[in-house]
Image (cartoon, helix red, strand yellow):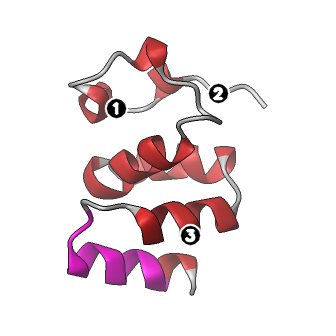
Amino acid sequence: MKYHLKKLSPTLFWDVSADDLKPQRHARFIIGRVLKFGDIADWQIISRWYNRRTLRRAAKLAPDLDLKSRALWRVVLGK
């Protein structure tokens, strides 16, 4: 599958170069940014890139998600 980080909102990676990110290697970072700052279009893109297990794990391990966001993603992604 082709991953094109340029498809995601550019504001997600304001502090890093998207060109330096590798979608498989940096999956938790990318998913965490989308879960915290992304919009529905960003969510739709990453939900095609990553399987549900990867998304759940990234949501669970994201250190900067607040409790309400973490609860929301737990409901959306399942336990």
Vertical arrangement, residue 48 with respect to residue 20, above or below: below
Tag 2: Cα neighbours inside 10 Å, few (<14), some, or many (≥20)? few
Q: Amino acid at mark 2?
A: Tyr
Q: List the residue tagged with mark 1.
A: 9
10 lies left or right of 58: left
Question: How far is mark 2 from mark 3, CA to CA?
Answer: 19 Å
Question: How far is mark 1 from mark 2, CA to CA?
Answer: 14 Å
Q: Which mark is residue 24?
A: none
Residue 38 image position (x, y, % from top left): 32, 48
Tag 1: Cα neighbours inside 10 Å, few (<14), some, or many (≥20)? some
Q: List the residue tagged with mark 3.
A: 56
Q: Amino acid at mark 3?
A: Arg
Q: List the residue tagged with mark 2.
A: 3
Vertical arrangement, residue 48 with respect to residue 64, above or below: above
Name the residue at 42% across, 75% down: 73
Chain part drawn in magenta:
65-75
30 lies left or right of 15: right
Q: Could you tell me if the residues under marks 3 and 1 are in contact, i.e. CB atoms within 8 Å?
A: no
| Front-lying residue, 60 or 7 | 60
